[in-house]
């Protein structure tokens, strides 16, 4: 359950829910009220669904069980079209760990394609990114289409501030977004941007977002309002929205920005910030994303308990906005229009 006061404007009730139940401190239902602003919008028929996961970290204590559970659910129960993973597939970024990752994909997601990118943990060891396609089936950065939508996968190449993206990668990102500026673009990137969501109450202290490359990335997101950006890295749990409106979602850049918790070890904490951070190995969280013509429904799932979480149910309006050609400018000189 969630407190009504914890919801933000984008929170919605599940599609077929008609009322909100009211419970007392003992967990007993004492009444109900209309949905009001939490009512699911009139959205037409769902076009397709996809899974959105992050921070798999297959060598953590419960991670392999967590990954097997999530892949099996998405492959067998939800029947998603595909799953996207926002990086940190491994703990130490070795070829041996990536081989384990590939085996899990082949075994537990045989009918559901998985599109992954490297995170900072894959960038810890020299030479790994040069061979990552052998294990994931995809290079450092790439794109694909599904229906009328474009999926843009932006891997990070290092584990340090100022070195997350290569200049040629940012040039490719600009050209991809510019070519698809009037389409809905789902962008997957690993590190939670410093000025967006993903660091509720300052709980996450290890921040490698910064430098010219991060500035350029942010300016691209701000220029293309048809982007829905997914990222992970901080691991923070869905329910931390109780202490921060920007825990899981933010639109202050002009595009939609969505933080995805860790599948392997979500993190908890409180208003005292980084000193309160704890690793919760007993939990495992991620999204099922239902796609409609003019919006998406984010359904945050607790994979361990097998339930969707009201605090992480969001409707994002993705009605397309027209972006004039050739209007992006880069003050740093990194991008050549």
Image (spheres, rainbow, N blue to C red):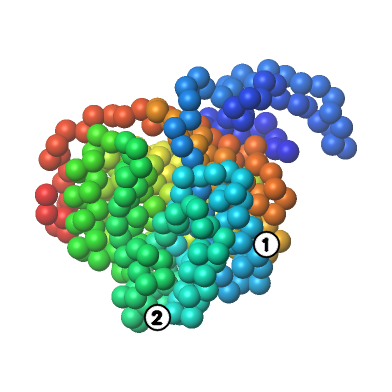
Depth check: 58 or 146 in front? 146
Residue under the image location 68 percent in, 18 percent down: 34
Q: Residues within 10 Å of mark 2 (few under 14, many from 20)?
A: some
The part of the image, by quadrant, that contains residue 130 is bottom left
Quick one: quadrant of the N terminus? Answer: top right
Residue named by callout 1? 280
Residue at 87% from the left image edge and 32% from the top image edge: 28
- Residue 122: where, in percent of width, then height? 42, 72
Residue 307 visible to the viewer: yes
The mark that comes first in sequence, 2 or 1, is: 2
Q: In the rendered image of this protein, does residue 220 appear above or below residue 116?
A: above
Residue 28 circle label: none
Q: Is residue 159 left or right of residue 204?
A: left
- For mark 2, what is the residue? 125
171 versus 60 height, above or below = above
Name the residue at 56% across, 32% down.
11
Q: Nearer the viewer, mark 2 or mark 1?
A: 2
Q: Nearer the viewer, residue 58 or 192?
A: 58
């Amino acid at each position: 359950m969630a407190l009504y006061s914890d919801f933000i404007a984008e929170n919605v009730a599940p599609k077929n829910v008609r009322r909100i139940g009211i419970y007392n401190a003992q967990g007993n239902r004492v009444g109900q009220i209309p949905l009001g602003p939490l009512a699911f919008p009139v959205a037409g028929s769902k076009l397709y669904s996809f899974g959105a996961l992050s921070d798999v970290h297959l060598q953590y204590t419960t991670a392999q069980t967590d990954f097997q559970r999530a892949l099996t659910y998405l492959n067998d129960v939800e029947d998603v079209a595909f799953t996207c993973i926002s990086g940190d597939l491994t703990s130490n970024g070795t070829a041996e760990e990536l081989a384990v990752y590939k085996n899990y994909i082949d075994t537990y997601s045989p009918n559901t394609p998985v599109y992954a990118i490297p995170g900072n943990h894959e960038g810890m060891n020299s030479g790994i990114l040069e061979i990552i396609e052998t294990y994931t089936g995809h290079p450092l950065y790439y794109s694909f289409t599904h229906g009328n939508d474009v999926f843009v996968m932006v891997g990070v190449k290092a584990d340090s501030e100022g070195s997350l993206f290569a200049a040629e990668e940012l040039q490719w990102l600009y050209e991809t977004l510019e070519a698809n500026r009037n389409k809905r673009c789902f962008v997957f990137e690993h590190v939670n941007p410093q000025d967006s969501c993903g660091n509720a109450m300052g709980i996450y202290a290890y921040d490698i977002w910064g430098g010219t490359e991060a500035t350029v990335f942010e300016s691209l997101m701000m220029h293309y309002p048809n982007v829905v950006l997914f990222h992970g890295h901080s691991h923070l749990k869905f329910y931390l929205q109780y202490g921060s409106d920007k825990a899981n979602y933010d639109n202050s850049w002009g595009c939609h920005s969505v933080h995805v918790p860790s599948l392997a070890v979500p993190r908890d904490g409180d208003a005292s910030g980084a000193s309160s951070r704890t690793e919760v190995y007993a939990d495992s969280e991620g999204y099922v994303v239902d796609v409609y013509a003019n919006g998406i429904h984010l359904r945050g799932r607790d994979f361990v308990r097998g339930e969707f979480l009201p605090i992480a149910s969001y409707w994002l309006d993705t009605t397309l906005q027209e972006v004039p050609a050739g209007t992006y400018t880069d003050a740093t000189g990194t991008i050549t229009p």
